[in-house]
Image: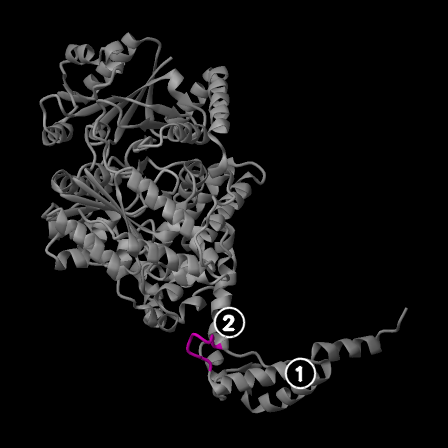
Amino acid sequence: MTTQDPEAKAAFLQRVREAIGRTAPLEYVPDYPPLKSAAVRQEEKVRTIEARSLARRDRIVETYLENAARAGWRVHRVWSPEDAADAVGDIAQGIRAKTVARSAEDLFRAVDVDGALRRNRANPVVLAAGRSRSRADVRRLAFEADMGVTGVAYAIAETASCVITPRKGVARVTSLAPPVYAAIVRAEQVLETLDDYFALVRHQHQRSRTRSFNYANFISGPSRTGDIEQTLTIGVHGPGEVHLVLIS
Amino acid sequence: MSVRTAQFRSASAQAVADPKLQTALERVMGHFTEARAHAIEEFPGDSWEQLRERASAIKAHTLEHLDYYLELVDKSVTRNGGHVHFAADAEEAARIVLDIAKQAEAKQVIKSKSMVSEEMELNRRFEEAGVEPVETDLGEYIIQLAGETPFHIIAPAMHKSRQEVSALFQQWLKSAPTNEIKQLCAIARDALREKFRTADMGVSGANFVVAETGTVVLVTNEGNGRMTTSLPRVHVAISGIEKVIPAIEDVSLFLRLLPRSATGQRITSYNSFVSGPRAQSDEDGPEEFHLVLVDNGRLNLLRDPEFREALKCIRCGACLNTCPVYRKIGGHAYGWVYSGPIGAVITPMLTGVKGAKDLPYASTLCGACRDVCPVKIDLPRLLLRLRQREAEGDPARERSSTWLERMLMGRWSNAVKTREAMERSARLGRFLQRPMERSGRIRRLPVPVLSGWSRGRDFPPLARKSFAQVWRERLAQEPSE
């Protein structure tokens, strides 16, 4: 595997240093608050965020749904896991889906999406490697599916974003390759702002010093482009139709 | 990308005379500025201003400690299982990426948008090495088919009409002719889906690189960036060294500033955060991750305290959209990767001042670029400074003003230093201009150096009486009260 020799790296950094006007490397962390803030303070910060999110849950969810509708999400608000499964079934029926790809999260134990899909004559396909399927097969199935369904790690009210992370059983392509996508979000997963989300990430990062923030993706609306005559067009490489099923 | 900055004068004259280009510019440019203005309306009082101040301060801090933060990036990415490569110039960066491709036995590479890869002429380098590069951002794909370079930082194909795009697709993809933009997007989608599935390697740019966590942040709308960073076995991210920000909590600030300044969006459809190859437990994602951090002239800006702030740029394109010069001549006239006011500042510093000495004059110094810049770069100051250096003859640069020009400027400076000298010179001027004046205009100044001023316009003659003289006469006439 291609790697750069440490001496070449050191020489490069020395040139950067000299361009700034210093000769020796810094021995200390620069005086910059976010890097200095101790894990204890971050812990407090996160507790405050959690308390605020709980206290203002209804308001935060309202804002989230308003922003989502504005950003092009089709919002389905439901009050039970059963209704959530039915909502996904209805969406599949609406687009006459034949196959629907879904992730293999624990969420689907409570939300029986498979049953609802079958009732609507759609075939559920669970996309997770290791289920005697190669990555190439997972990929092919995702590209051929009419719709993809996943849960989320968090949602962010400020930007109407679903945060997808590679938790167990979540293939990145499930929310990307099919032309229609449905995200299932529980009300308690909704954070108020981008700041809240990144504070949590930082906290997790500080607690486990290895690979805590390996990959994440925000989905904040349908795939779009303005590249031809700056005319907004929906659904280029990613899903053009995105549904948000929110369980309160 | 080859440097064609020396042809700026002829290229911009051509652009202004091109009716098709002018139609395209008029159609598009207004949208951008309106969308941006609308997007920042939701920030009450000076809260938008405060975001800009903070972003500017964070960038300044990072640049002052760039060696420290680059080393931190290296540590973090390595800890995550990825590889960091530092490249001194475009040539070395291209060699590194080609090496990675060779090791990975890549035959086909999918690319999402990267301006640094334009600096490297990476597509040409891939082709020479027998690797097929495919641009997957719709705009980049269109200009790749057309064999052109980006016209705008964030809207690379904005100068192409739907008819031209359709013609390109007919030629290269054998598609049926259509003037429906939706249909054109669908054609590109189908053509690129197969490439996404089969490519061996993905190359992306980076909007930000977070030092603390070793995270490459990508800001996209189409989904091609996600495809590029998720599907191929190898992912290579290429970034200028100035894209580093310290901590993951800084990201929210920049995510508020960038899309609003660029397209007027509250947020783009997708933001990807990639800190390394996939974990063992992950279902998909690349097995190999490389981050190539490129200097390619940026240290020239870092070294120079007056120009360091140009490295704060987050490449939103707002200064292009608002610039009366860019709005008339478009991006290609600037002759290299970066256009508009920021291009006019950094291109001379990255590619050498000599060939790009006309670029600092591609500005009316109206200040609109400074007002919209999300990180508060004082672009007019930098443009003026470049002009000044060029005129003074910086020790490191070639002196471009002639001895005659310098002598005349010296005389001018003496002539206006004191009131007496100025009135004396004005009297002399009024005498000398007599033979040149025709019905209140001077059409041509037959003096070397000065003749340039009257080439494209009439020169106003000195008034018969100076203001001071008129004033004195009036005071003498009016009885004092």
Q: Chain of mark 1?
A: B
- Measured as percent of width and height from the top left, residue B161 is found at 26, 52
In the rendered image, residue B1, in percent from the top left (x then y), is placed at 26, 62
Q: Nearer the viewer, residue B248 or B159?
A: B248
The segment highlighted magenta reads B393-401
Question: Looking at the rendering, which quadrant does residue A68 occupy?
Answer: top left
Residue neighbourhood size for the residue with mark 1, other residues' Cα within 10 Å, grouped as few (<14), some (14–19), many (≥20): few
Is B399 magenta? The answer is yes
- Position of residue A17 in the picture relative to residue B91 (left or right): right
In the image, which disc is placed on residue B464?
1
Three-letter residue code for mark 1: Arg
What residue sits 32% from the left and 63% below the top? B336
- The colour scheme applied to this rendered structure is one colour
Element on which disc 2 rests: helix
Q: Is residue A19 magenta?
A: no
Residue B259 drawn at (x, y percent): 40, 41
Q: List the residue tagged with mark 2.
A: B388
